[in-house]
């Protein structure tokens, strides 16, 4: 990158920078929440966002502006470290996949979510830690 002002004297200011394409990546999901379902599963849900705009003009969701809808969840807690790809803005961690501590509601579950796009993955939404009442 070169900066040169009209009427400058001397060599232009030079600066090298890496282009990371942040504007091409999808925005991160927001409003990550968790709840315990009647069957013991933990329901994780979030709000997706679009690079195509934010307006809700005709009562339907704005197109994502991506080839497909894909999210990457990172779950950790009580000996569990998992990365899960899912195709909807929610995921159920069934009771059979939970540790005894998660089932009892005594262990925390840390969750991070990112949206996968055509040109890369979004920055992750802030990691949230949940402790949910036992099943």
Image (spheres, rainbow, N blue to C red):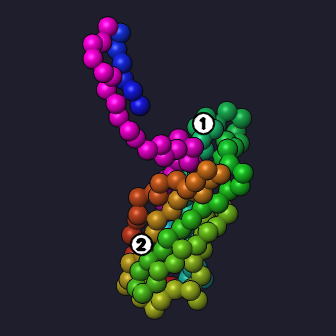
Q: Is residue 130 above or below residue 6?
A: below
Note whether 88 is above or below 15 in the view shown.
below
Q: Residue furthest front?
A: 10
Query: Relative to 51, does residue 117 appear above or below in the rendering?
Result: below
Number of numbered discs present? Answer: 2
Up the image or down, 127 lies above or below 132; here it is above
Q: Which residue is drawn at the image coordinates 38% and 83% (left, top)?
A: 107
Distance of label 1 from label 2 (alpha carbons): 30 Å
Residue under pointer 2:
110
The boundaries of the magenta stretch are: 7-33
Kindly give the residue lying farthest to the top in the view shown.
Answer: 7
Q: Count residues near mark 2 (Cα–Cα under 10 Å), then give few for <14, some for 14-19, many for 20+.
A: some
User: At 64% across and 60% down in the image, what residue appears?
Assistant: 70
Residue placed most toward the observer, 67 or 43: 67
The image position of residue 29, as x and y in percent, is 52, 54
| Lateral position of residue 59 relative to residue 20, left or right | right
Residue position for label 1: 53
**Which badge, 1 or 2, is on the more N-terminal residue?**
1
Where is residue 89? Give x, y as percent: 61, 60
Query: Would you say residue 11 sits in the magenta stretch?
Result: yes
Q: Residue at x 53, y 41 (%)?
A: 23
- Quarter of the figure with residue 46: bottom right
Query: Horizontal placement of 36 versus 86: left or right?
Result: left
- Location of the N terminus (image quadrant): top left
Q: What's the residue at 56%, 86% (across, down)?
A: 97
Q: Indicate the position of residue 49 as horizontal and vertical percent values.
A: 57, 47
């Amino acid at each position: 990158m070169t900066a040169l002002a009209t009427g400058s004297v001397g060599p232009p200011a030079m600066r090298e920078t890496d282009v990371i394409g942040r504007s091409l990546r999808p925005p991160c999901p927001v409003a990550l929440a968790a709840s315990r379902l009647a069957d013991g599963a933990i329901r994780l849900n979030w709000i997706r966002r679009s690079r195509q705009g934010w307006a809700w003009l005709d009562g339907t969701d704005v197109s994502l502006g991506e080839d497909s809808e894909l999210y990457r969840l990172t779950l950790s807690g009580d000996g569990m470290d998992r990365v899960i790809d899912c195709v909807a803005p929610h995921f159920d961690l069934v009771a059979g996949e939970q540790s005894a501590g998660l089932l009892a509601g005594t262990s925390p579950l840390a969750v991070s979510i990112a949206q996968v796009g055509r040109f890369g993955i979004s920055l992750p939404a802030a990691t949230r830690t949940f402790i949910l009442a036992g099943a």
